[in-house]
Amino acid sequence: MPDHIRHLKTVEQRLLWLSHWMIHNANHLRPKVDGIKIGGHQASSASMVSIMTALYFSALRPEDRVAVKPHASPVFHAMQYLVGNQTRGKMENFRGYGGVQSYPSRTKDTDDVDFSTGSVGLGVGMTALASIVQDFITAKAWGQDVTPGRMVALVGDAELDEGNIYEVLQEGWKNDLRNTWWIIDYNRQSLDGIVREGLFGRVEKIFEAFGWDVVRVKYGALQRAAFAEPGGAALRDWIDACPNAEYSALTYMGGANWRKRLMEELGDQGEVSALIDRRSDAELAALMENLGGNCVETMAETFAAIDHDRPTCFLAYTIKGWGTPIAGHKDNHGGLMTKAQMAEWQVSMGVPEGQEWEPMATVSDTAGFRSFLDKVPFFAGGSRRYTDARLDVPAVAAETSREISTQMAFGKFLDNLARADSDLASRILTTSPDVTGTTGLGPWVNRRRLFSRTAQKDAFIEHRIPSTAKWNFDPEGQHLELGIAEMNLFLLLGAAGLAHSLWGRRLIPIGTVYDPFVHRGLDALNYACYQDARFMIVGTPSGVTLAPEGGAHQSVGTPLTGMAQDGLASFEPAFADELAVIMEWAFDYMQRDGGKDPDERTWLRDQTGGSVYLRLTTKPLDQPGQRVDDAFRQGAIDGAYWMRRPGPNCSIVIAYQGAVADEAIAAAGLVGEHRRDVAVLSVTSADRLNAGWTAAQRERARGNSKARAHVERLLDDLPVHCTLITVIDGHPATLSWLGSVAGHRVVSHGVEHFGQTGSIGELYRHFGIDRHALVASVLKLTAGSPAC
């Protein structure tokens, strides 16, 4: 046996043991605090061991990036432990507080995770979109020294039920996808049962239709050798015809049962009988379980044979639970070896008692093996987490139009950036799921072009047909046009938002989407934020303000999503100058990577940085005139400022967020005819206001009585009898919490139900978010009381 294969087999056995011992320790040996199963997916890990050994220790290079199948997390951590990138303490605390994570995490694990996984299917899709981002970078003058790598996904066969995978296949075909490997652990078992017969034959045709090479890895080296013996062809035919469930059951029952079944069905053929008889029960079991994906030699040879950059899908046949006592059992997905099974298996694996955590236990040639590990290309260069310098942010000039919508202002700001020659503008990547022209990106794209690895002229321009869109495709282009699939949008933003770490080249990704369809991609949005990707998502048009489109196109809950989503600073500006201030801040915020200590002025962790969500609208508003004072600028960033300050006897505050600004301001004027001293609070970010307030409360609970949030300082001078009237074109809970800050009474106006078609005025009246509804609330509250 060549030394390389011999060492790979040693790695394979070491990873099999260490991953399973880590799970066993967490479930059976470590003291239980909650009295519940810790879990860890031993069987799902076992089926991946040979694949991951061949991939990481033979095929990969440092520039390659991998999304590991979530349930193979123990193998990944065992691998990092074996090469010295993980500590025993964290391994012993698997799935415990501060230990290695249940699923690989870029932000929670300390070993070298490329892509977080956990929500099945998303890591798979992200690798393809990351490859497109890689092409985007290497096509630019500032990215040509980046060495392209393969983007690899290790895929559980049950993940192929996830629809987002097929959306990504289409997007990859449209963008001439390359340098992408998807390696499918085809163990034919899922959490609840056995994968249907013939399923992958259908899936295979889908891959081929979208231009992928499909490589079936069905037989291991032992099986291929047996097939070459007399009678081997009949054995191969029997294996091919055996149903998935039968194969799994026979695997679990072991060698004697394999012999009985094979002799019953093939034993009357002399050559086949001789082939079976030449093997002991243990050898026969090893032969029948030696599928291609469980043979490290076969997997290494298969990977090495790929000499092109076409997208490739490897169908690696495996046994779920391979090499363990629970191999093949249909309940093994969440099952665990018992203490007795583990003790027996430990003996069979040759691991001495007391050396369970020893990386080199069972290794006879430790010097040679260590030398092999030191030379593995993928690990030789150390950590592959890069960084890039922060880009200077040019000033975003406020739009001075008398009447303009925030969506149009956003488009003008980007157009101004496109005209200039700043470093930040050159690193912007814009994208949209087939709504580029209707979300404000048109002028930017006309100037900066669409990205494609090969130049493509706009036929309308070539034929001199008038059009507002000049859609030339070019390697220098900076816009990636997507199909109508919001999951792809957020996965692409996630991949581009990690560019500084994955390739050492910072991007400023900006995506636009119709605001109600933010929720169509929530799983991928959460996934992107969990990875600490940095991007700007612009949801526009929003709310029932998108009146003629009807309820399906009118967002209600997205402001609450903006408040709840970790890693995402959410804003809903009403005026263009607010948007200018916020965007200028956001371009810097997206690049920050400081500590997690909060700013004691706001108690927000702004130096940590993050992504940004802008909820914009198509409704033009009269602009308030030039405002440059620090209170306005800082308040717009911190979340709120006084549009009309309260006096000492203020009895009514009208607080608004977003497009209903004109209704709130007009209502204050009408109320002023009946009540004196009416204040108007302009909220630009309920998210940041609320986050600062809750953080300040936690700080006070720790004993710092001086901790005060921005919203607390804003409301400090209001009399206790003052009433807050809140209004938003969205769910009223977005602002209703303001009364809890200082104990004021609150009446909240907003939208809780699906809208319908109509004019803005009609829908505002229908939902009670117009000026007259606000005035009615004030008059009802103050009926019979003296004016202030």
Image (cartoon, rainbow, N blue to C red):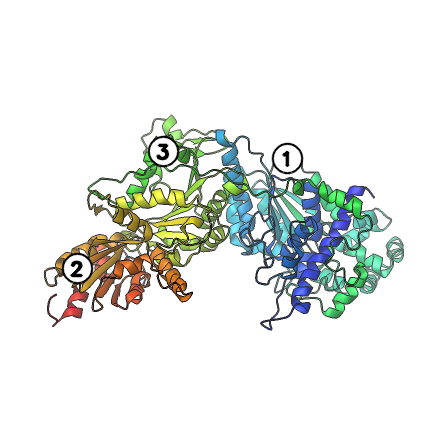
Left or right of residue 373: residue 457: left
- Circle number at residue 668: none
The residue that appears at 64% across and 50% down in the rendered structure is 184
Q: Nearer the viewer, residue 168 or 37?
A: 37
Sooner in the amino-acid sequence: mark 3 or mark 2: 3
| Residue assigned mark 1 | 308
For residue 439, say whether it is visible: no
- Give the image quarter of residue 668: bottom left
Quadrant location of the N terminus in the rendered image: top right
Q: Position of residue 587 (x, y in %)?
A: 39, 42
Disc 3 and disc 2: Cα gap in Å? 44 Å
- Circle number at residue 418: 3
* Amino acid type indicated by mark 2: Gly
Q: Is there CB contact under 8 Å for labels 3 and 1?
A: no
* Amino acid type indicated by mark 1: His
The residue that appears at 17% across and 62% down in the rendered structure is 648
